[in-house]
Amino acid sequence: MTQAGTIASDHNQVTAGQGRMLQLEIFRFNPADPNSQPHMQVFELEETPGMTLFIALSLIREEQDPSLQFDFVCRAGICGSCGMLIDGRPALACRTLTQSLGSCVRLAPLPIFELIGDLSVNTGKWMRGMSERLQTWVPIPADVDLDSLEQPMEPQLAEQIYELERCIECGCCVSGCGTAIMHEQFVGAVGLNKIARFRLDPRDGRSDADYFELIGTDEGIFGCMSLMGCQDVCPKNLPLQTQLAFLRRKMLIAGVTD
């Protein structure tokens, strides 16, 4: 290698060892403070190897501004708490590596949900309301025998149910849904996915006619415009497109034959 090549190689190694300076432009607003006004605030910090947005936000809160509000629990893409708009796209902060983003990143809270403050939103309130509307539980008959053994389930069916049960209710699919943005009462892919899950469950004795009463409206399956923004942003890669198309066909048949 020539001397010039050696110098260039050494320079590249030094540059690669230096972290980028990141600029995080973060939405700030505290609805509980009458003096607070919505605005964007820029924070700078040095990128480190393997840094996620969760790590970056934690450092900002620990070292620069302890008033910064954002949610987290598991830090492993399981709880769904850290959902936010990352450069305009719903995603989980704990699953987003800063190296996959530009040096300037714009963060905002998920739309649709009630704002708690800054990047923190109340997804739990929305999810509970949706679950109560759709009755997302297995109905138990009044004469159930609590001492009886649970009926065995075929492994293939259990796998199908588990696949839909992987939803972590992060809210990304709702925030990425055009219908949900336009229609406040739309139950979103998360709600329809729950119906698909219970429809598979042999312990749930409801018929398609019963499910039609829950989702056979424009607030349910017929409100979906099939844009598939939900599947595009789902951090768990759930087969939402397949389930929504399947439910639409079944509910159409149930509505016609009712």
Image (spheres, grey):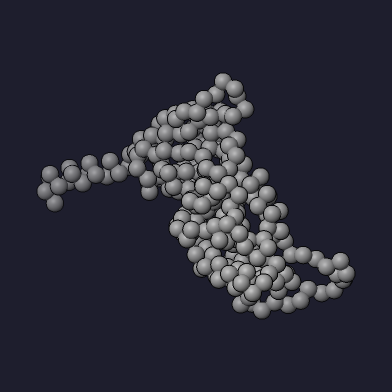
Where residue 203 sits: x, y (%)? 74, 71
Q: Quadrant of residue 232?
A: bottom left
How far across and how far down the image is residue 20, in percent? 34, 38
Q: Is residue 195 visible?
A: yes
Q: Residue at x 52, y 68 (%)?
A: 245
Tell me the quarter of the image containing the C terminus: bottom right
x, y (%) of residue 1? 14, 51
At horizontal 27% and vertical 44% (from top left) the residue drawn is 13
Instruction: Say whether residue 163 is left or right of residue 15.
Output: right
Does 26 sit above or below residue 146? Answer: above
What's the residue at 11%, 48% (across, down)? 2
Against 99, is 70 above or below?
above
Residue toward you, 27 or 226: 226
| Depth check, front residue: 59 or 16 | 59
Q: Position of residue 223 (x, y in %)?
A: 54, 57
Please indicate whether residue 144 sits to the left or right of residue 44 in the image. Answer: right
Name the one closer to the observer, 8 or 147: 147
The residue at 51%/40% (across/down) is 109
Q: Determine the image quadrant of residue 209.
A: bottom right
Residue 167 visible in the displayed image: no
223 vs 230, nearest the viewer: 223
Task: State the count of labels.
Answer: 0
